[in-house]
Amino acid sequence: MRGIVDTLHDEEFSNYICAECDTIYEVFHLKCPSCGKPGTVQKIEITPKLYDDEFSLLNDAEMEFIDPVSASNITPAAIQNEKTPAIYKTGFELFDDMFDGGIYSGSVNIFLGRPGNGKTVFLLKIAELYSRSGLSVLFISSEESFAQLSGKIRKLGITSPKLFFVSMMELGASMREIDRFKPDIVVVDSVSGFFKKEIDAIQSSHIQIQECLAALSREAKNRDIAMLVSAQNLYPSCIHEYESLSCLADALFTLDKVHSNIMILKAKKTRFSDSLPALAFHCDFSSISPVDVEQLGISCEGLPETGEVSSIGTVSFSHIQGGALFFDELEALVGPGVSAAPKWNVGKGICRDSFETVAAVIEKYCKIKLSEMNINLRLKSETAVADQSFDLAIASALLSSFHDIEITKSIIFAGKIMLSGNVSAPADIEKRIKTAAGRGYKFFAVPDVDGEISRKYSENIDIININNIKCIRRSLSDKVLKRP
C-alpha cells in the first residue's frame, strides 16, 4: 500500500483506492468495479510531498530554536556583538542609490525581465563593477553553456581577476561552488533555469523556482552573501507570481528595454528604502551609464520619426521613467461586441486598473457603452507605463477609434483624468512641452497650461487645452488636429 500511496503524491485527482485489489479511482464507488467487493473503496488522505517526512523544505537539523528578546533589552550594548551587514558598492552611483547607498550582504535581489531584453549583459556589467571595487564575485549561469558565456565575456571585454564564472543548472552543485569560493557577491542568471534534483517537478516550473529561490535566500543569509538573481518574465501573470514570492527576497525589480541600448530599472518591492525608485540608463557591450535626463526626450524603439502622418486610434504621448522623458505610441481598436461577452485585450505595459478607470469615466460622461464593445489596446514599445499622465492618451485613443477620427502624429498627449471627468496636468509640464517642441512635435494636448509657458513656446508648438474628458472629441475633430 505504501508504494502505491507514494505514486499518488503528484496525482491530485487520485483520491480513492480499493483496499482489496489496490485499484485507484478518481471517484468513490460503493462496490469496487475491479474486484466486485462492496465497501472496499476508501478515500486516501495524501500528505503533500513537499511537507512529508521524506520530502520537506526544512528538516529538524536545520531548525534553530532561539529565545525571544524583550524590546526593553534591545540596547546598543546588547547588539554590539551582532554582525553588521556589509554594504557593497559598484561605483555606479545611481544604481547604488536603488539600494539606499549599496547592496547589503545577506540580501537577495530579483531582477525580472522579458527574455532577450539584456538581463545577462546588464548583470555581467554590474558584476564587473563590483569586482573592480575589490569584491569577489561568482557569476552562475543556468541558461548558457560555458562556451557561450565565455564568448559574451570576451565581447564585453571583462578581464577582472576577482570575477569568476561557472555554468550549471543543478542547485546543489551551485551551492557547493558557493561554499568552495566563498564570494562576497553571487549573481544567478537565471533562477528560472535552475532545478533542484530532489524536487519531483520539471525544470522552470513554479514549484522548482519557488524551491530554488527559497534555498538561495537561506544560503545568502547563512553565508552573509549578497545575491543578484535574474528571472524570466515569460507571460503576463509572471510578475504576480514573483510578487507572491517576494517574501523570499529583499528587493524585486523589473528590467525593461525601451530602446536599442536604454533600459529602465524599477523597484516593485524593496526593504532598503521607503520609496520605490526607478532608474533609466544606457547599457551595451561597451559600458553602463546613466541617461542624461536633460537631453531631449527618447523615442521608444519602433517609434517612427515625427512626421506629417495621421491615423485612427493611434496617439503619441510622453511619460517619465527613472527621471528620463520618453515618447511612445498607443494604439486602440474599439468595435461592436460580437458575442454576449465582449473582450477587452489590454496589452503589455498598460495598467489594467488605469484603463478600466478611464473607460468607466468615458461611459459616464461621454455616454458611450464601452462595456458592450470589443477593445484592443497596445503600446508600440510594450514598455510598462506607470505615469498617471498616461490617462489622457488612453481616453483619446479610445475616442479616436470609436468615432473614426484621424489624429496627427504631431500631437502629444499628457494629463491625468479624474473621476469627475476633469483632466489635470503633470507637474513637469514645461519640461515636456520644451522637449516635445525640440523633437519637432507641432501640438501638445494638456489641461490648464500657464499662460506664460504657452507664450514662451508658442513659436514652436501649439498648446491645446483639454480640461475635461467631454472636450476630447471636439478637440480631436478640430481640423488642425485631424490633419497635419
Image (cartoon, rainbow, N blue to C red):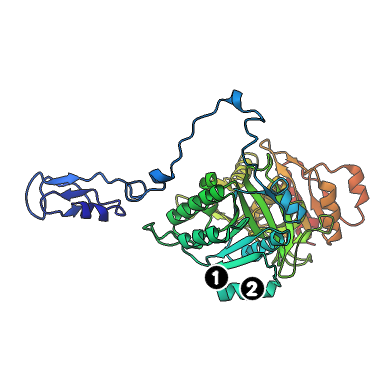
Q: Considering only vertical position in the picture, is 82 above or below 184? A: above
Using the rendered image of the protein, determine whether residue 459 is visible from the camera's viewpoint: yes
Q: Secondary structure at mark 2?
A: helix
* In this rendering, position of residue 27 left or right of residue 448: left
- Residue type indicated by callout 1: Glu
Residue 366: percent from left, percent from top: 65, 43
- Residue type indicated by callout 2: Lys
Residue 101: percent from left, percent from top: 73, 47
* In this rendering, position of residue 177 left or right of residue 159: left
Q: Residue drawn at (46%, 63%), measured in percent from left and top?
A: 170
Q: Quadrant of residue 47?
A: top left
Residue 298: percent from left, percent from top: 77, 60
* Circles 1 and 2 in contact, beta carbons < 8 Å: yes
* Residue nearest the observer in this picture, 150 or 427: 150
> Disc 1 designates what residue?
144
> Disc 2 designates what residue?
152
Q: Residue drawn at (82%, 56%), measured in percent from left and top?
A: 436
